[in-house]
Amino acid sequence: MTQTAATRIFDELSKFMTSTADAVGSMHREMEAMIRTQTDKWLSTVAMDLVKREDLEHVQEKLSKLTEENEALKKRVGVLEGKSAK
């Protein structure tokens, strides 16, 4: 094999490797974009189903107060029913 033939082979191999690296880089960018798009879609649908912590705590406080009021009313009704039965 002559120097010129070897040089030509290495030149072609270099071009092939460069184009392969470019193709892999392009595929990587496409996959990254697709994953980002799918993740954004998933997060936007999940975000609609989530409740803020402050809202949850507010509802829990209200529920606690209502439960206390309900228990107090049950006692009052029990007392009143006891008086009316006499």
Image: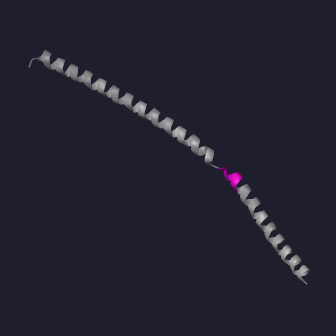
Q: Quadrant of the C terminus?
A: bottom right
Say which residue appears at 53% left-offset and 42% top-offset: 42
Image quarter for residue 13? top left
Colour scheme of the rendered structure: one colour
Spot the residue most to the top.
4
Instruction: Give the magenta part as a residue range.
Output: 51-56
Spot the residue most to the left.
1
Q: For residue 53: magenta?
A: yes
Q: Quadrant of the N terminus?
A: top left
Most frequent secondary structure within the magenta stretch: helix
Q: For residue 64: magenta?
A: no
Query: Considering only vertical position in the picture, is 75 above or below 12?
Result: below
Which residue is nearer to you in this view: 60 or 16? 60
Say which residue appears at 62% left-offset and 44% top-offset: 48
- Residue 63 vs residue 30: left or right? right
Image location of residue 62, percent across then percent down: 76, 59
- Residue 55 vs residue 48: left or right? right
Say which residue appears at 89% left-offset and 76% top-offset: 80
Query: Considering only vertical position in the picture, is 48 above or below 53?
Result: above
Image quarter for residue 61? bottom right
Image location of residue 60, percent across then percent down: 72, 59
Which residue is nearer to you in this view: 42 or 74? 74
Image location of residue 71, percent across then percent down: 79, 71
